[in-house]
Amino acid sequence: MIKTILKNTLKKIDLNKYESKVKNIHNMIHNKTGAGNEFLGWTDWPTNYDKSEYAKMKTISTEIKGMVKDIVVIGIGGSYLGSRAAIEMVNGLHAEETHNIYYAGHTLSSTYTYQLLKKLENKKFAIVVISKSGTTTEPAIAFRLFKDLLSKNLGKDKVNLNKYIVAITDKSKGALKKQAVENNYQTFTINDDIGGRYSVLTPVGIFIMMLANINTDLVLEGAQLAMKDTNNDDVMKNEAYKYAVARDSLLKDYNFKSEMFVAYEIQMQLIAEWWKQLFGESEGKNGQGLLPTSAIFSTDLHSLGQFIQDGTKNVMFETIVKIKKTPHDLSIAKDELDLEGLNYLTKFSLHEINNVALEGVLEAHTKDGLVPNIVLEMDTMDSKMFGYLSYWFMKSCAMSSYLLEINPFNQPGVEVYKQRMFKLLGKK
Ligand code: PA5
């Protein structure tokens, strides 16, 4: 379902050189012997997930959808990006939704939060609060604000507040778990051995996808397929490892410092955000790693496109996502007057034009701009593909991080801002 094409990297990627290293790291991942091995639960999750919890999530999500039209999902980082990425990629940006899903807790913006609270005034809505640690400040603040509003909106029915709240958190520890137990909220668990940015296929992502009417059976089917396809220690045959090796070689052998993830589908913008978190938080340690950036074409061709084509050289390469077949396509009708001169395009569908644009840009950026390009060819943008691509990128990220000899599963740098912020806020 994903093919890594290395024809346009401009630099020779010597896959053979990596063969034994990749085999060793593959074994390290599968035997759980590398740094951070206590967080490798995601590797077999697509088949090992808790089946009874999954069934319960289906029941509860159906109940919630029957009770309310508006749902606030509260979380940040790995507790937020994956589900939103799935919803936008699979459902699109203008789908006819039966329910409104709003996000909070990923920002401290008072204006954003005020406006969302205002929108939900006098409404019965549901809250899904997600925090593995249960102690992250941003979602904790949002939870308090939205819970207070919900309680007010429920009026006499506020005795039933707990029926409108679901908490997804650790099975036993953290402030959120404590609140959930005390207030009798429905909870779903994030396993100890799965970290935030590797948790999209757990309740963190799956429950929200269910609320958004995504077929999660197919998501997991896609992930199982990726699990099978990437369980291969041969870099020549494992497309996820091929991608990891190509980016490692561009960094180490050719000194490129930044990778730009480029999609030609605007509903993949959040996939790009999820990907940036996955690679940025996993690899950006000990003064190492590629700076992950992203662009959505065509829109960014009319902004960053100038820099890519003509700006500072030898700093970045692009990783382009090419979608073979989109869920929807359009044709362009002939116009008798043809004042805009578009009739020559009527032999193409809109998606074909998009893919021709991709090929043209690929030539321009590589041949004229001398920017290396990795192409990731994906079948489509449906539920199964989301499951496949999320697992596939997590696997390549683990390989790529271990090639840098770093622990992919911690984020010590994130703690630094928290400590400074807490000190300034006077937290005891
Ligand atoms: O990948 C990670 O671990 C982080 O991005 C976390 O997901 C993020 O910091 C949110 O943490 P928590 O779920 O504990 O609130």
Image (cartoon, helix red, strand yellow):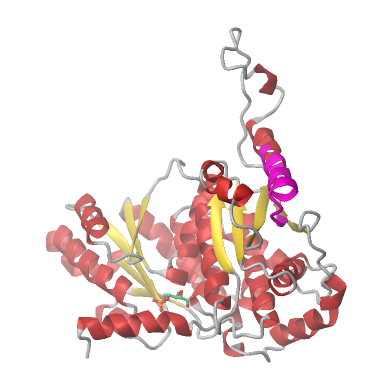
* Residue 400 location (% of width, % of height): 68, 75
295 relative to 228, above or below: above
Give the residues in magenta: 357-375
Residue 352 as seen in the image, left or right of residue 60: right
| Residue 316 pos. (x, y %) | 63, 61
Can you give x and y, in whole percent of width and height, for residue 60 in the image? 41, 64
Please tell me whether the stretch drawn in magenta is mainly helix, strand or loop: helix
Q: Residue furthest right?
A: 16
Specify the farthest residue to the top: 337
Please report the residue visible at 21 percent of the width from the left and 67 percent of the height from the top: 145
In the displayed structure, 339 sits above or below 251; it is above
Q: Residue at x 29, y 64 (%)?
A: 164
Closer to the camera in the image, 376 or 223: 376
The picture quadrant where one finds residue 353 is top right
Q: Position of residue 258 (x, y in %)?
A: 60, 65
Q: Is residue 362 magenta?
A: yes
Residue 167 located left or right of residue 266: left
**Is residue 267 depicted above or below 44 in this figure?**
above
Report whether 148 appears left or right of 306: left
In the image, is residue 428 part of the stretch drawn in magenta? no
Q: Is residue 126 left or right of residue 43?
A: left
